[in-house]
Amino acid sequence: MKKHIFLYMLLAVFSSVKAHELSGIITSEDNNKPLQGVGVYNKTTGAYTYTNVSGYFELDDISENDIIYFYQLGYENQQLVIVKKHLDSEINISLKISSASLDQVLIVSKVNVLSNFVNVDLKTSPVKSSQEILRKIPGLIIGQHAGGGKAEQIFLRGFDIDHGTDIAIDVDGMPVNMVSHAHGQGYADMHFIIPETIENIDFAKGAYYADKGNFNTAGYVDINTKRTIKDNIVSVEAGQYNTLRALSMLKIVDEENSKAYLASELMLSDGVFESPQNFNRINVMGRYNFNNYTDQEFNMAISHFQSKWDASGQIPVRAVESGLIGRFGAIDDTEGGNTSRSNFWINHNKQLDEHSLIKSSAYLSKYDFELFSNFTFFLEDPANGDQIHQKEDRTLIGAKTAYEHSFHLDDHDAQLKYELGVGFRYDDVNDVQLSRTLNRQTILERLAYGNIDELNGFAFGHITYKIYKWTFNPGLRLDYFNFDYENLLTTTYDNKSENKFLVSPKLNVIYAASPKLQVFAKTGLGYHSNDTRVVTANNGKKILPTAFGTDIGVIMKPVDRLVINAALWSLFLQQEFVYVGDAGIVEPSGKTKRYGVDFGLRYQVTDGLFFNTDVNYTYARSSDDPGGQNYIPLAPDLTSSGGLSFRDFGNFSGGLSYRYIKDRPANEDNSIVADGYFITDMNLNYNLKNWTFGLIVENLFDNEWNETQFATESRLFNEPDAVEEIHFTPGSSFFLRGKISVRF
């Protein structure tokens, strides 16, 4: 009997022992408003969570003497040592605003924690033009080759991504990439984004994320614009080559729960070329935010962008070397184009309870595009020349809803969070065409002309299971596509339709050994859709070529203000058919393999001095072709970018930045080589009260470089035979601009 009594007493004691909890509200010291997305991290156990829309957090498995960190970029870190009174109680934490710093970001078991460190780069050295937005992504290089109005050419992880075939780009949940575009699949024109409106950039490499779909093979980029602005700002830039840029960001609603601002941008430039670009671009965006700081937040934006330009195009090396034209001359200066995009998007977050959240977004975009190009000059038509005209008129509509829920397992030793989402995207593209033209005026022949309807419905789910220092994040994505093409060139009705269903599994495994060390392994399947004209022309073959990738890497902070990241990765792509928009033909590209190493370093030397560098090496080859004939044209094998920036040096701030790309093969046997380059830019600002006076210098050392290059077969006027060689767009020479801005 005594034994039974002792056993009952022992059970009673152990049953009374339970895991303790810490919860509370985190606010901003300057306005006492709740802060969303603040990290709460238990250094002792490795447990972590983030505040919701009401600033509320709940962290379990708390014991006396545990050390809790509260952190968010732009605020001073706070530390709390748990004592008995904190157990199972609510606390209030107030964070003080501070300049962005590397020590404000901890390495926890987050799947894409590297984005947080890159946003320190963004805060300490803001982008100064729409071209610079993507340059903030480690390992990503861009180039412009059509007068400043055309989307940039993108290079990442051994890809010549062209204008966006293998990187998914979003702005506030609205896709930037255009499927089945007149100029090429995945065309991503980011010029409708006003740089000063960017709040942060979320990015990751690889195809390992269930909520990311089409074009997410080499990686994704999500750009988030500012919900609110603290000050009004008016800015004017002027510089060489008749360049003028004007910007304004003005608050139009400033109430306790409702905020709204209007941003506008005007850009004019003739460019460095002998034939003036006559470039002009206008951007207008209105942004509204409602936050009740209790259980919901609503964001809405409406924007319009339009641009027009002339271009000198890509010129052959032989024309420059023979003295026929100068480096900034043109063979056909009637190239150019115009484009516009009007957008409306909404985002709504509803906190159902402390552990459940519904996120919804929707968008509507009206887009048109017209481009005149001439790559081969007089190869096809010796009399009239080879100018082509690409045009389309598009309506894009889509929506997505996701449900998140988190809870605890194993008596609070483990955390489990799942997200389930559904959505769709529909592109209605009318009068998409490719035509041969003369001086932009006369249509000589239509090569392709039709209407495209493309629908993508999708569902996704992923689980984040955290136990001790391990995080497991399996995911699954389901995609359905319907492709429809109506050929308007035929005299009889010619409409073809194909559909496809795809399943893409993902897995991320993370080991956070400490707040200063994370080791990760990632793998998964991704895809990019083929052009509707490819799909229907090939009777549905290879509709959604699959990409299989893996990453193994580490992120570490040896000291509070030094971050080092490194990764080994591989990526394999299936056979795919590519629609060549410039020729209106379908070409098979074959299977490809890529292996690479990424290395990055970010060091905050002092409170106001920052250094960052990224070096990326890739081995990229075709899998089907023999050795020596299997180079992937224009795929870079070595790139690097970085810079040194400073702030609060008296009234001065600024920095130097560089970008490097090594010589690379321009054709399959490497007999034609695209020259590499190393370019340095500089900016310097002087702050006087609420005024800022600045200088911006591109190509500081006035290097001669080719921004984009292609191996092209062409024939000049009166040349007897065609010649295949490098055709290039010269990079800008030394380019100086002055800037004055005022905040009020």
Image: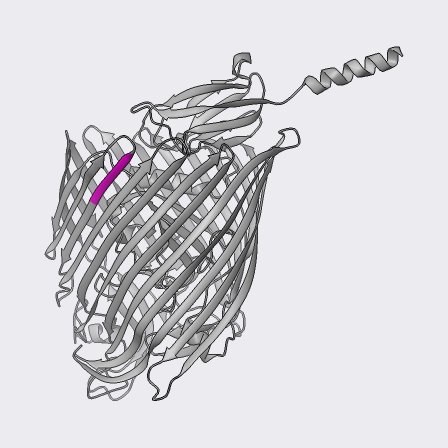
Q: Which residues are magenta?
A: 258-262
Q: Main secondary structure of the magenta part?
A: strand
Residue 700 can be seen in this image? no
Residue in the image at 23% along x and 79% along y: 387
Residue 231 image position (x, y, % from top left): 20, 34
Q: Is residue 83 magenta?
A: no
Residue 597 can be seen in this image? yes
270 shown above or below 130: below
Q: Quadrant of residue 382?
A: bottom left
Residue in the image at 21% along x and 37% along y: 253
Q: Is residue 720 left or right of residue 56?
A: left
Residue 83 image position (x, y, % from top left): 53, 14
Residue 41 image position (x, y, % from top left): 50, 28
Q: Quadrant of residue 229?
A: top left
What is the residue that sits farthest to the front in this orientation?
Answer: 352
Q: Is residue 261 magenta?
A: yes
What is the residue that sits farthest to the left in this orientation?
Answer: 242
What is the residue that sits farthest to the right in this orientation?
Answer: 1
Q: Nearer the viewer, residue 572 or 306?
A: 306
Q: Nearer the viewer, residue 417 or 69?
A: 417
* Colouring of the image: one colour
293 shown above or below 21: below
How many marks the image carries: the answer is 0
**The N terminus lies in which quarter of the figure?**
top right
What is the residue that sits farthest to the top in this orientation?
Answer: 2
Q: Is residue 14 left or right of residue 66?
A: right
